[in-house]
Amino acid sequence: MENVIVERVADFLKLYPPFQDLSSEDLYLLATKVRVHYIPKRNYVFKQGDPAHKEFYVVQQGAVGLRSKEMSSSNWIDICDEGDILGLRPLFADQTYAMEAMAKEECVLYAIPFEAFKELLLNNKMVMDFLLESFASNTRNPKASESKGKLLSSNYNSSEEANSELDFFQQAFYTKNPICLTPTKTVQEAAYIMNKHKISSLIIEENKLPIGIVTDKDIRRWVANGSMNSEDKLSTIMSSPVKCVPPHVHLADVQGLLLQHKIGHLCVTKDGSQDSEIVGILSEHDIVTAQANNPIALLKQIERVNQKEDLTRIRKSLSSLLKAYLNTGLPMPYVMKVSRLITQALMHRVIELSLEKIGVSPVKFSWLGIGSQGRGEQLLLTDQDHALVFEDVPDEKFESTQAYFLKLAEEISRIFNELGYEFCPADMMASNPEYCLSLSQWKQKFSNWIEEPSSESIMMCNIFFDYAKVYGEDELSKQLSEHIFRKLKGNQRFFAYLGEDAVKNPPPLGFFRQFIIEDDGRHKDEFDVKARAIQPLVEAARVLILSEGIEGKNNTIERFEKLIELEPQNEDIYAGCIKSFHVLSRFRAVEGFKQNSSGRYLELSTLSKSDKMKLKRSFKPIKDIQRLLKNRFQLTYFL
Amino acid sequence: MGWFKDLFKKKEDYPEFWQAYAAEFKQSDLSRVIVLDCETTGLNPVEDKILSIGAVALHDNVIHVENHFSVFLHQKLNKPESIAVHGIVKNKMQPLTSESDAIKQLLKFLGNSKILGHHIQFDIQMINTALATMGLPKLKNQVADTNDLYSKFKGVDQSMHKSLDELCDEFKIPKKDRHTALGDAFLTAQVYQRLVISV
């Protein structure tokens, strides 16, 4: 018999992963078991440390914020809205919640009892994988499966303790297509190949099946025996049988096996037995690397390195780390923070090394990152944008002083370029005499931009206002900021210009909620996520925070957070912007890593339905914030 | 007159299903609330008939979709003007149940739970009329009306007459499946949650 309630519930669920992968029978059955909760604004779904509920939740209406007590109370780790899942923890881990979930707006939640779900999970591997991924979102596994339509949150806990707990979910990654030899080859041939490829082991195969393994150790033993003969076959020295594991094996299991059998290598086969095809090899070294490839380790390495090559390697590690984070759906605030910290440390080290090379600076200076570098919002390798400010010097010394800093900047910029940061096409770099200036000159420059607003000066402001000290004297950048804020105070005309610029790109949805796409040029039919969606948010945050006279807030997210504090009445709008910014940055970064590009242009046809919905949903806050800007700066008179 | 005879009917004369229903009231269960809605041939409790009954249970203010009740009744009386409202056409696909069977099933589903509905007195009256036809007493359940709860929620003394549509709009509940008994019950249940779960 038809049941309208169950149908409504099923209609909703089937719009979202993982439910969209279920058969309609399973979906209907599941919908029958749903319980509908209503949670008023600011009430808790669960609190940190609460005993596990017997159900998990899908947000049907409203938004639920997740945060952990260990982190500052105003920081949301993630915000779940329509179609997002939360409260999965009891399905995988211990009996209490690791964070609290609070209704940011009044919410309707569909609760799904674990009991009803467990059977479905057994029969739907895709659903299981999806939930596992969204739960274990802080694995460091770089080989995790490609992210699909799942920009969703889960019970993520940032504490060390939780990390070790989640290591359980980490898959070990292995070297694919290992070098194999047949048992009839000689030991000498094997040694030659191992030497040439700098590897410590070879799998011995027969018809693609692993029958043994030869490692450095086996060859050493062969030499030590003294009875070696250059004609000796590998079959005489190989260790056999070889221990095998399946491709999807957890790090913890691998460590266990290696320890238990006192061995250094495992062969990866299709089904994990010796009677199936070889797919890879896994060494103790791989495990160590997997564990070393974490943010803390990278930061420590940066402090220690002395050579460019090492910096390049670390820059590459950062990229693969970020890529893995994005693939596993780790919350964006964390991903961005890791990226910011490591990038800053890396640049700091580059400047230190350059100073050693060029020689001590004649006067105090400050190296400034500008644009997205200044905001600390870079995930991808982008263009270099920087500037340099040095102490005022007597006129007669100016030329030689500037010459020194230009030379330093050139060296730094050259190393950045070698690390993969392209030179700025508009030459907005400290190596350009225009942007390598004394404090008074910089003050004058900013005064000009602020006092005589034009479209060009506004563009410069948009780039140079977001500066952050990367290296050098705090005092210089502080004095410059003080100067700028004095100039800005009460300057309605300038803010009107800046505000007008911030709303020049309207929310990118046209009639019938279609995406506005590029209609000519190289990126025809693609969606410019940077200019049409990210930039409007960045610019809105900037003009609002500057007009409030708040110094020292450069990051778009931090700016919106501060704005929430200052204007609680607009919390919903600003919180929406934060969420959108995270979603859009993730889209851009994922695309950038995939295409090895700036990620700026999204090919809409390759996006899944739920990704497109996520994207569209993130445009609403753009509309809201632009309306707010228009009212606040009376822009209607300008437009 | 049947009702006169019924008045003096001894308790033990009532059929087993009623006895079982009545026995439940020896205890009270405050955690379960049944949200109920009837679709009828019209608004006159004397002339008109019940066409369908839909109900869904809340346990501790959480709607349990699985715990629902839905029945379509076989009725001789069928006024074309009401079809326009509820869309139940005679001989449509739903299997139809006789009124006495429907009431019997409903009592079993209700048990001793509190009944809640929007303008619920009308629905209660319709069910009581059906019970009387079967020679049975009135429903024993406690009854609450979303309309009264709404007035209380607003802090107003006298009853404010709001339609279910108006309440759904006010609470931003998407109106789906209006004028099906089960659909209305589900919407009313959602209104109820917003009225009783304190902010």
Image (cartoon, coloured by chain):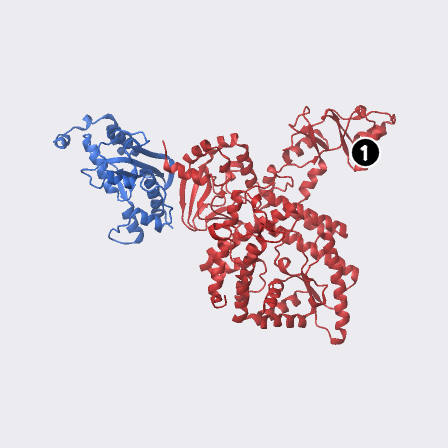
Chain colours: A red, B blue
The residue under the point 63% across, 67% down is A478
Decide if residue B184 is on the left or right side of residue B45: right
Determine the image quadrant of residue A217.
top right
A404 above or below A623?
Answer: below
Q: Would you identify the image quadrant in which residue A5 lies?
A: top left
The quadrant of the picture occupied by the N terminus of chain B is top left
Chain identifier of the residue bearing label 1 in the image: A
Find residue A420 and report its horizontal and vertical position in percent. Answer: 71, 52
Percent position of residue A63, x then y: 46, 48
Q: Indicate the position of residue B70 as horizontal and vertical percent values.
A: 32, 34
The amino acid type found where label 1 is placed reads Ile
Locate residue A137, reporting x and y percent.
57, 42
Q: Which residue is farthest bottom?
A: A395
Q: Of B122 and A498, which appears nearest the observer?
A: A498
Front in this rendered view, residue B106 or A71? B106
Tag 1: Cα neighbours inside 10 Å, few (<14), some, or many (≥20)? some
Q: Secondary structure at mark 1?
A: helix
Q: Nearer the viewer, residue B40 or A538?
A: B40
The reply to whether residue A258 is visible in this rendering is yes
Residue at which label 1 appears: A193
Q: Eyeballing the image, is A431 above or below B160? A: below
From the viewer's perspective, tell me whether residue A403 is left or right of residue A7.
right
Out of B133 and A248, give the one closest to the viewer.
Answer: B133
Residue B123 visible in the picture: no
